[in-house]
Amino acid sequence: MSEATLRPATAADVDAVATLFHQGWHDAHPGLVPAGLTERRTPEAFHDRVSTRVAETDDTTVAEVDGTLAGFIMVAGDEAEQVYVDAAFRGSGVAARLLTEAERQVAAAGHDVAWLVVVRGNDRAHAFYVKQGWADEGDVDYPVTALGEQFVSPCRKLTKRVR
């Protein structure tokens, strides 16, 4: 397998990013998030969200391996807001490469500390972030909007000094 190539997402990536986002989210979150949120995380909802983010901001970076979308990040200010890797590429180093890029983007935007949240109970993701040098700052209730409805997701906040 070749090394991942990172580049800004384009409109041509929207379908693949939305599909990966939907699959990854549903792989990690059912049973860990508030009732009703899982049902609102439809393929269409992810497509709309990704379309908007790619069209209106330049905060989405994709990783490609041999022409295949392997993962993506979305960075919003000092938050590494989304970090997703296709199941076929887990353990390949793609996630670490994407997370390092998120840290670089946060630092380049002038922030000293990056942060992210991981849903409580998503032990695989939590362990990965800690292994990458992120510090667990404790429980946080993270506001989420899905199809116009507000939810509060039980999360752990992690931080990392990036400058």
Image (cartoon, rainbow, N blue to C red):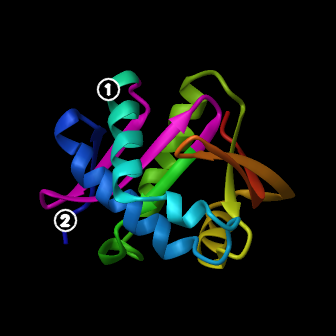
Amino acid type, label 1? Ala
**Which of the image's four quarters has the C terminus?**
top right
Is 152 included in the stretch rendered in magenta? no
Q: Which mark is residue 55?
A: 1
Rendering coords of residue 121 (x, y %): 71, 76
Q: Which mark is residue 2?
A: 2
Rendering coords of residue 34 (x, y %): 70, 65
Most common SS among magenta residues: strand
**Which of the image's four quarters has the N terminus?**
bottom left
> In the rendered view, does 34 fall on the left or right side of 60?
right
Q: Residue furthest left?
A: 67
Rendering coords of residue 114 (x, y %): 68, 40
> In the rendered view, does 52 fall on the left or right side of 3?
right
In the rendered image, which quarter is residue 145 located in? top right
> In the rendered view, does 151 fall on the left or right side of 148?
right
* Label 2 SS: loop
Identify the residue shown where x is 66% and y is 39%: 162
Identify the residue shown where x is 52% and y is 45%: 147
Q: Is the residue 117 above or below the residue 127 in the image?
A: above
Amino acid type, label 2? Ser
Tell me which segment is drawn in magenta: 57-80
Q: Residues within 10 Å of mark 1 (few under 14, many from 20)?
A: few
* Label 1 SS: helix
Comparing marks 2 and 1, which lies closer to the viewer?
1
Identify the residue shown where x is 72% and y is 31%: 112
Rendering coords of residue 23 (x, y %): 38, 68
> In the rendered view, does 157 fall on the left or right side of 150?
right
